[in-house]
Amino acid sequence: MNMVMNRFEQFSFKKVFVALIMTALVFALVAPFSAKAAAADGTYNVDYTVLKDQTNETSRLDSYLTKPAQVTVANGKNVVRLTVKSSNLITTFKVEQNGVLQDATVVSTDTASNTRVVEFEVADLNAKVNAYAEITIPVIGYTGKYDVQLQFDEI
Ligand code: HEM
């Protein structure tokens, strides 16, 4: 009986061991292709496209924001910094934060070049980010209030 038990235990131990090794191997092989790992801390130049609302077409706003954006990854947060051109015409620029459109923080304004640097957080750089701009061109009486999405390239 003892011998039978021993053989049984040995057999089952071997099985569990092999199963564990197999699982570890599968994880090691699959992990690099599954969920994208967060980028290491640092500042990256990241290209992006401004898309027309709910489409994959380039928005008119695209050429009014400079590329690439500077993305600073630190403490699990991604802070995006970019420059708004024709700053006097793009009167409002908001980016969604936790489901709510919020004014991007103005870091600096350069009146001579009519630009302003803005900053905002993006929780997931792999997802389209909802943004919004208001454009006011008084001389021609044009006012536009537009939803757009920002799509970032991979870091
Ligand atoms: C600073 C210059 C301008 C910017 C940044 C701008 C931006 C935009 C944006 C973001 C859209 C939404 C579609 C998209 O995402 O491409 C749009 C639509 C449109 N824009 Fe402008 N625009 C500008 C100047 C003008 C001017 C000068 C006119 C004509 C007087 C104009 C007429 C239109 C029209 C007719 C549409 C489509 C209809 C609509 O959605 O209201 N835009 N523009």
Image (cartoon, helix red, strand yellow):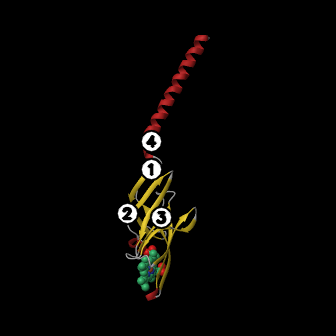
* Picture quarter with ligand 1: bottom left
Give the total of numbered labels.
4
The CA span between labels 4 and 1 is: 24 Å
Which dot, 4 or 1, sits closer to the camera? 1
Please state which amino acid type lies under the numbered disc 3.
Answer: Glu
The residue that label 3 is drawn on is 119
> In the depicted view, which residue is nearer to us: 27 or 112?
112
Please state which amino acid type lies under the numbered disc 2.
Answer: Pro
Reading the chain from its start, which is encountered first: label 4 or label 2? Answer: 4
| Marks 3 and 4 close (CB-CB < 8 Å) | no
The CA span between labels 3 and 4 is: 36 Å
The residue that label 1 is drawn on is 41
Q: Residue at x 44, y 72 (%)?
A: 109
The CA span between labels 3 and 1 is: 17 Å
Q: Indicate yes or no: mark 2 CB to ligand 1 under 8 Å.
A: no
In percent of width and height, residue 26 lies at 46, 37
Mark drawn on residue 33 = none
Q: Residue at x 39, y 56 (%)?
A: 44
Please state which amino acid type lies under the numbered disc 1.
Answer: Asp
> In the depicted view, which residue is nearer to us: 40 or 109?
109
Element class at badge 1: loop
The CA span between labels 4 and 2 is: 32 Å
Q: Residue at x 41, y 55 (%)?
A: 43
Reading the chain from its start, which is encountered first: label 1 or label 2? Answer: 1
| Marks 3 and 2 close (CB-CB < 8 Å) | no
The residue that label 2 is drawn on is 68
The residue that label 4 is drawn on is 30
Q: For residue 155, say whether it is visible.
A: no
